[in-house]
Image (cartoon, helix red, strand yellow):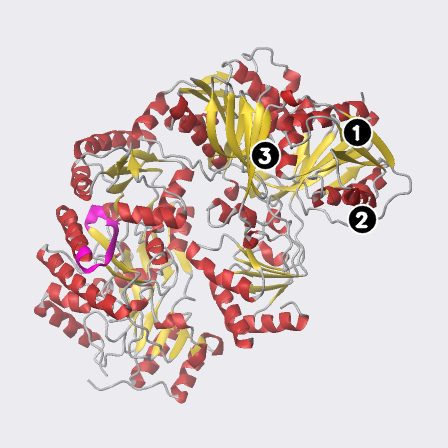
Amino acid sequence: MSSYNKVTPQIADQLKAVVGEKRFFEGEAIKPEYSHDEMPIYGKYFPEVVCEAETTEEISEIVKICAANKIPVVPRGAGTGLVGGCVPLNGGVIISTRRMDKILGYDMDNLVVHVQCGVLLQDLAADALDHGLMYPPDPGEKTSTLGGNVSTNAGGMKAVKYGVTRDYVLAMTVVLPSGEIMKLGKTVCKTSSGYSLLHLMIGSEGTLGIITEMTLKLIPKPIVDVSLILPFPDIASCISAVPKIKLANLDPQSIEFMDADIVKSSAAFTGNSVFPQEVNGEPVGASILVTFVGNSEDELDLKMEKLAEVAEETGAFDVLVVDTPTLKKDVWAARSSFLTAIEADTKLLDEMDVVVPVNRIAEFLLFTRELGDKHDIYMRNFGHAGDGNLHIYCCSNDLEEEEFLRRVKIIMDASYAKCVEFEGQVSGEHAIGHAKKYYLKESVGDTAFNLMQEIKKVFDPDMILNPGKVCTYICE
Amino acid sequence: MLNILVCVKQVPDVDLVKMDPETGNLVREGVPTLTNPLDLNALEAAVQMKEKYGGELTVITMGPPMAESTLRECLAVGATKAAIVTGRPFGGADTLSTSYSIVKAADMLGKFDLIFCGKESVDGATGQMGSQLAERFDASQITGCLLIEEVNEEEGYIIAQREMETGAETVKATLPCLLTVEKQNYRGRIPNLKGKLASKKAAIETFTENNIDGLDLNKIGEPGSGTIVPRIYPPDLPEPGQIIDEGSTEKSVAKLMDMLAEKGAI
Amino acid sequence: MEKRDYKNMWVYIEHDGKKAEPVGLELCCEIRKVCDITGDKLYAVIIGDLAESEQTLVKNCGVDGIIYVSGTGYEYYNTDAYSNAFTVLSKKYNPSAIFVGATVNGRDFAPRTAVQLDTGCTSDAMQIEYDPKTGDLEFIEPAVGGKIMAVITFPKLRPQIGTHRPGTFKYAPVGAKENIEIIKEQIDFPVENIRCRHLSFAEYEFDPELEIADCDVIIGVGNGLSDEEQLPRYRELAKLLGGKIGCTRPLFDRDILPYKLQIGQSGVIIKPKLYISFGISGAVNHVAGITADTFIAVNNDPEAQIFNYCDYGIVGDMDEVCDRMIAEIKAKQ
């Protein structure tokens, strides 16, 4: 593979002509955050130029210029990723979609919404509720963009009941690596019409095309909801409740789990211990937070009573009911603060976003904890117990970065190998980026990985779009 | 065995209350209600006292029938009895008449050793109810209570800390005593399912203008109020200041900082 | 008695023997203006011994008279003796209005006195007007989270009692009157009847970061702040400008910053030379607490009400603007 070209002053002028001076940045004017996402530990790489696009056509023009000059081009939304997916490993041009933040309109008959890719998840979520509707995908990072969500096939807390982002994308507009604009999908819910390029594009992390507009499926918003906290003496008993809840036909919207350490960190950080750390003097080892939605209070009461039976059967200390606006706000604020709380009291951290079969969750967590203990790295865990998607953070405040990275690599190598052994997935919702691609290869095997590489070449023979990500290597 | 009373209020979520730009009236329809957050701190302090010393814990509120949900919320976390003062004639009350109505109703429920209130409500925000109830209960008062150190029922006193501007004052008060509670040390607890389900079925005593002994109808509602609100109006908005927009944040900030430096403001 | 038979207005001068609380003096200055309109006399009420020099300060606020209360029961503040003193005095002299600084103790006894006198009580009004048609004062304050201004009156009852936050009114003494009436009252409150007694006082460790009332530069942070993690940059900006940070009510409610940093009608009232607000919508109860020589507003919503109160505004992401300001200042150092 031949190397990339630099952005010359002439090319810069062409780009500037597309977006105008105000939305064009180069050199010193580029903010430092464009060199990393929320995991700076995976390295910082600066672009040569940042263009803030406002339309699909502008993106198309920019990509055409880059294609003609063989300049790498990387799309970037809110930059809240955790695997370095939007980091410009080879420099070049970043196309920022943050100005493409318009909700273009609702189609109330077909229950869909048309959006630009830079709309923030929290903005669509709130706006949909105002329309009496709900956008079910609910990744923890509410300030991420919908374009980013679709590009990573983000999951979130409600995946147990509603599925993931992929299940809500009906159609999209994409700018291909040639600069050509293509529409994929239709505003209908069924298709049996050839290879699904739409679904190939979803979760492709900006390596096959830049998603600029989307048609997303919505559902009527639930009328009532309630969350319940079940504290357990240990992780094993805690996780044992998860399949039982599903088998009891309770159809929870989410089942989140949190271990005692993360609850303690969160309490210290927010100054508010929402999740119980002990019940009647007994220390809580882990808890689950279960949410039900429904059409009436009575319906929820029935579910709660059934849940109480499961709780008793599996050895929960208690069942706490979160059903007032104030409590809901407190509990979800605490749940949302987990990552921030970890970041606040940790100098060095790395993370895993693995998925394992639900019945292997406890085993996997104990395995990683032992690894952490052995290498003097402390671990913090929380995640989506309902679907086996775990967020495991390796943390240290004492080690030098180099030594930290060395030890974490040992832990990661062993953990991902264990994950493969358990028939799990490398990433549930944070995607691969450049940080996890070696583990992806291990996990899917050579044949599948090679196929991915071949697909990439079909779309992007010159490898200009988001190079070095998912299944391609940096070409110098 | 202590007999404890907690006074609570259901309030609209003030963040969601809007003003009708046409009429200048507050639009409360469809605005969710909640239990005044500081009242939950008062309730928590009361529940802790009940757990420590034993006894009954009654919650009382005044408001429309829907305020019962606030009482059930309290029953779910440890209150043992609940009462509501409700009825049109109680409407439009200020703190003078509200404190009168609540104490008249509470007298029907017995004598209380400790009475707890939130420090203030998020809607009215006068912070007066505690002192006024204390006067009407003929009780001592500890406003802004940070921490209860001791309750001695036999000798009839309570020792507690009050939050002052520059420190904490420790005071000793006789029983009955009314306390308004600061939130720091008494964060509300989450109810368990058992408490929740029981609270849904619990009986709530209802007081109206017709069944409170010795109620002077001239002292309740708007007629019994010392203050009224003859009018409300939207706040005057001054003309907007100068918006600095130089095309990018960087340039706008640079311009602003230059202007400030020139003015001698920085 | 008819309400017109109640005459004159009183201001309570809270003190610790050595110093008068500034709020009492501020209220004297404001009520002086009100009395000039209504024709009432202005009396300061001093309970217990106060240093001579501080009494001079009170006199300089243009009072027509001073009521000195002496007797047992006043050594330490307590609700019973203090509320009783006002009740006894009020029943004897029938004032039209009583104004009390909304200190912790002022807020403790004033509402109780009101019940003893069977009258109403207002709190935290930012403005006091007089309606000559009714003869009633109008206590005007932002209400319901600052969404409206409410006018509160006492249509029937007297005295009209109000508690007012320190800093609400300007301390602008007009000078002492020639003849100041001196009234001395002995009101003994039996010490054994004090039901809530002072035992001890533990002063908080003095944290200068929490004292913002007299600070020249204040960086205000509002609900636009989505989490605590964003705070350090605002502290840094404040530090670079030689100032401190403050906040709006939601940040206190969310336990992000302490109550002592809450700026506004129901918090601290500030008069800085420079105020920079970040992510603050501009509810009246917040801005009512600010008098700034230069007021800068930063908010990502161009429609935010805060821009109506600022001298200069920037529409943009609060964190980004803050970071740029820090960079600008550092570049110039």
Q: Are marks 1 and 3 on the same chain?
A: no
Judged left or right of residue A307, residue C301 is right
Q: Which residue is mark 1?
A: C95
Asked whether disc 2 touches disc 1, contact meaning CB atoms under 8 Å apart, the reply is no
The residue nearer to you, when weighing B40 against A146, is: B40
Q: Are marks 2 and 3 on the same chain?
A: no
The residue nearer to you, when weighing B204 against C202, is: C202
Indicate which label's residue lies in the foreground, 2 or 1.
Answer: 2
Determine whether C251 is above or below B34 in the image.
Answer: below
Q: Please state the horizontal and vertical placement of residue B39, each as a whole percent of the image.
A: 49, 32
Indicate which label's residue lies in the foreground, 2 or 3.
Answer: 2
Query: Identity of the amino acid at label 2?
Result: Pro
Dot 2 lies on which element?
A: loop
Looking at the image, can residue C198 be seen?
yes
Q: Which residue is mark 2?
A: C173
The residues colored magenta run: A373-388
Q: Chain of mark 3?
A: B
Q: Please state the horizontal and vertical placement of residue A242, each as a whole percent of the image.
A: 19, 41
